Image (cartoon, rainbow, N blue to C red):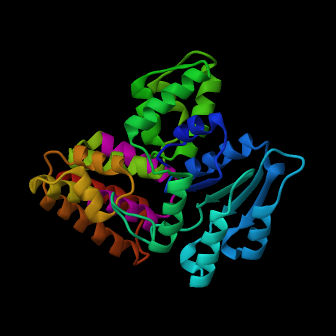
Amino acid sequence: MVLTDEKDLQQQIKNGLGNLYYFYGSDILSVENCVKQLIQKVGGVKNITRLDGQNLNLEQLADEIEFCPMFSEYNCIQIHDCNAESLRENERKTLLEIVKRAAGQTVLIFDVTGFDIYGGKTGKNRKPTEKNKKIIDYIAKTGIVCCCEPKSVTQLSAEVIAKAKKNGCIMEKQAAQLLVMQCNCQTLMIQNELNKLCAYANGGTITVQMIEEMVMPQLETTVYVLTAAIAKKQVTKAMQAVEELLAMKIEMPYLMAVISGSLIDLQRASSARLEGKTVQDVMQDFGYKFSFAVERAFRDSAGETPEHLAECLDLLCRAEKKMHTGMVDERVLLEKTVVEMLKR
């Protein structure tokens, strides 16, 4: 069985555990949460044998598979970050044979958070690399595979509202969406900020104003605000974003690189719109992991032309060259460059 959400796993294990599990995906927090659910089910970490998948001892694994626990209900083995691509052919065959022997009280868990199981492939149709996929496919037939990929703003917002309610708070839909976007859809960050907001609200309502005052926007979020303001020629909003970025005290070369990346997102979206392409087309063609970034680019580039955005990128490129001479005030340089962009 293949699952795509940790909640589905929670529902599945309510009636008992199976023998085989495999967790992977770009949403690392969700992968870790899946493992935590199983650890809790078997009675905690004291009942887990954890093996390093990068230095996997197959003889030890074979022995562990056959172990019959006397003081716990399950013989639970976790293999962390085993990359089948790094194993020799005979090792892969041996590993699969051992996996097939998992039965009875044995619960075998594979989890991947430390390497790219897709082998660098991007796009919505990407799959795990061939040798990893063989193990995953077998486990999908006889056990549980959970692929944890980042969720959309809408999905995450609904989860945030539900979690706030569970903590005794009411959360406005607009506030939930703002929180998700402020945190760039990073589930661990969303969770930490939501805990803080719920503690502050103390059973009350979490509003947009509370999030604006209490949740520090991430660099990328503020850059999106800046580039959107440039595209729409909103001078006041753009200069406010510049002030916020400068207050973060980020090194100017890195800051300019992030601004360039955001402008390129807008240019791609603007060009795609002219060609009748969709968000999914852009994600697949350019390897975006998060749909919300492309959706935002489509929204913020409405009415823009690729030519104007190219001019803005050219101005930024010239500013970077001046910056590298070491004879300019970087703060003033950024402000002047943004003003020039707004004039175009």
> Taking 285 as reference, is 200 left or right?
right
Instruction: Report the predominant secondary structure element of the magenta stretch.
Output: helix
| Residue 302 in sight | yes
Identify the image quadrant of residue 316. Answer: bottom left
Q: Which residues are drawn in magenta?
A: 237-264
| Residue 249 in sight | no
Query: What is the number of callouts on the image?
Result: 0
Q: From the viewer's perspective, is residue 233 above or below residue 139?
A: above
> Taking 240 as reference, is 101 left or right?
right
Identify the image quadrant of residue 300. Answer: top left
> Taking 128 as reference, is 74 left or right?
right
Q: Residue at image x 62%, y 60%? A: 110
Q: The C terminus appears in which quarter of the rendering?
A: bottom left
Q: Is residue 242 magenta?
A: yes
Q: Residue at image x 38%, y 59%? A: 332
Identify the image quadrant of residue 235. Answer: top left
Position in image of residue 312 (x %, y %): 22, 61
156 vs 170, nearest the viewer: 156
Position in image of residue 120 (x %, y %): 42, 71
Q: Residue at image x 82%, y 60%? A: 67
280 vs 85, nearest the viewer: 85
Position in image of residue 61 (x %, y %): 74, 69
85 vs 263, nearest the viewer: 85
Q: From the viewer's perspective, is residue 215 above or below residue 198?
A: below
Q: Is residue 27 magenta?
A: no
Position in image of residue 214 (x %, y %): 55, 33
317 vs 323, nearest the viewer: 317
Q: From the viewer's perspective, is residue 41 above or below residue 131?
A: above
Residue furthest to the right in view is 71
Q: Residue at image x 68%, y 57%? A: 108
